[in-house]
Amino acid sequence: MPVAKVARPRAAMEAREHAAMRVPTLILALLVLVAVALVYVWSHLHNTQLKYRIAEEMTVRENLTEENRRLKMEIATLKSPQRIESIAREKLRLQYPEREQVVLIK
């Protein structure tokens, strides 16, 4: 029977050592799981923020495109020959030259 008494304390010590090794492994596994969860949440939030920024920039782009179109129309209106001629006649009191006033230069 002395052999059995020696085997039990050895088994108990091995069980304690095995349990002592499980705790750090469990803590490490939990830390890794928490880190993975934090990375996932961070990436999801970052993705959402980027989508909002893209939507804002697209709105700005649409506004600028509309303003560009409006400005091109205004330029076309301001450059129209009819408008320039009416300003020249009414405000500047210009008129077409007579035939005698035209001098050809060669």
Image (cartoon, helix red, strand yellow):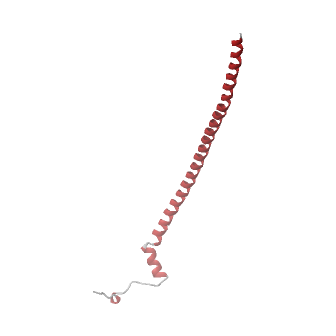
Answer above or below: position of 32 versus 103.
Answer: above
Number of marks: 0
Answer above or below: position of 66 versus 26.
Answer: below
Name the image quarter holding residue 4.
top right
Residue furthest to the front in view is: 2
Question: Could you say where residue 36 lies in the image, as x and y percent from the top left?
Answer: 61, 38
Name the image quarter holding residue 15.
top right
Left or right: where 27 falls relative to 55: right
Residue at 54 percent of width and 59 percent of height: 63
Question: Could you say where residue 99 lies in the image, as x and y percent from the top left?
Answer: 33, 87
Answer above or below: position of 49 versus 92.
Answer: above
Residue furthest to the bottom in view is: 100
Q: Look at the image and tell me in which quarter the C terminus lies.
A: bottom left
Question: Could you say where residue 31 lies in the image, as x and y percent from the top left?
Answer: 65, 37
In front: 33, or 85?
A: 33
Residue furthest to the left in view is: 106
In front: 12, or 39?
A: 12
Q: Look at the image and tell me in which quarter the N terminus lies.
A: top right
Residue at 67 percent of width and 34 percent of height: 27
Residue furthest to the top in view is: 1
Question: Could you say where residue 45 lies in the image, as x and y percent from the top left?
Answer: 61, 45
Left or right: where 103 falls relative to 19: left
Residue at 70 percent of width and 20 percent of height: 12
In front: 12, or 77?
A: 12
